[in-house]
Image (cartoon, rainbow, N blue to C red):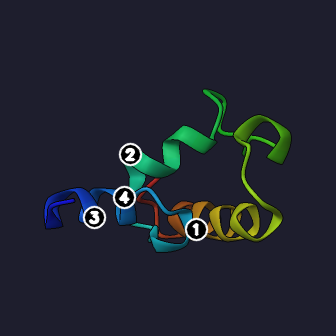
Amino acid sequence: MSTENKKLNRSLNPMDYTFNDVEQLSRFVTETGKILPRKDTGLSAKHQRRITNRIKQARNMLTMQ
């Protein structure tokens, strides 16, 4: 594997998202702005909690609406 592929795989890890990654976080939110449940996202409980916190941070910082 090249280093580019490794970087891409790391960016797909929900633990690495920040509140500035609006494009990635928007995959876990409905059109009306509700956070999708774990059974729909397919994430583990730990990752779902992290994504939820990041979405809430993005809302508070007004980067995601």
Q: Which amino acid does label 4 sit on?
A: Asn
Q: Mark 4: few, some, or many residues within 10 Å (few <14, many ≥20)?
A: few
For label 4, the residue is 9
Q: Nearer the viewer, residue 29 or 42?
A: 42
Q: Which of 43 and 18 is in front in this view?
A: 43
**Is disc 1 placed on a helix, strand or loop?**
helix
As drawn, the label of residue 23 is 2
Disc 3 to disc 4: CB gap under 8 Å = yes
- Give how far apart the Cα atoms at labels 3 and 2 are: 20 Å
Q: Please give the name of the residue rendered at 60% of the width and 27% of the height, measured from the top-left corner.
A: 31
As drawn, the label of residue 54 is 1
Mark 3 or mark 1, which is nearer the start of the sequence? 3
Q: x%, y% of residue 17?
A: 46, 67
Q: Please give the name of the residue rendered at 50% of the width and 42% of the height, measured from the top-left corner.
A: 26
- Give how far apart the Cα atoms at labels 1 and 3 are: 23 Å
Q: Mark 3: few, some, or many residues within 10 Å (few <14, many ≥20)?
A: few
- Give how far apart the Cα atoms at labels 2 and 4 are: 16 Å
Between tags 2 and 4, which lies in front? 4
- Give how far apart the Cα atoms at labels 1 and 4 are: 19 Å
- Give how far apart the Cα atoms at labels 2 and 1 are: 12 Å
For label 3, the residue is 6
> Quadrant location of residue 55?
bottom right
Between tags 1 and 3, which lies in front? 3
Q: Mark 2: few, some, or many residues within 10 Å (few <14, many ≥20)?
A: few
Mark 1 or mark 2, which is nearer the start of the sequence? 2
**Is disc 4 placed on a helix, strand or loop?**
helix
**Is disc 2 placed on a helix, strand or loop?**
helix
Q: Nearer the viewer, residue 63 or 38?
A: 38
Q: x%, y% of residue 25?
A: 50, 51
Q: What residue type is labelled 3?
A: Lys
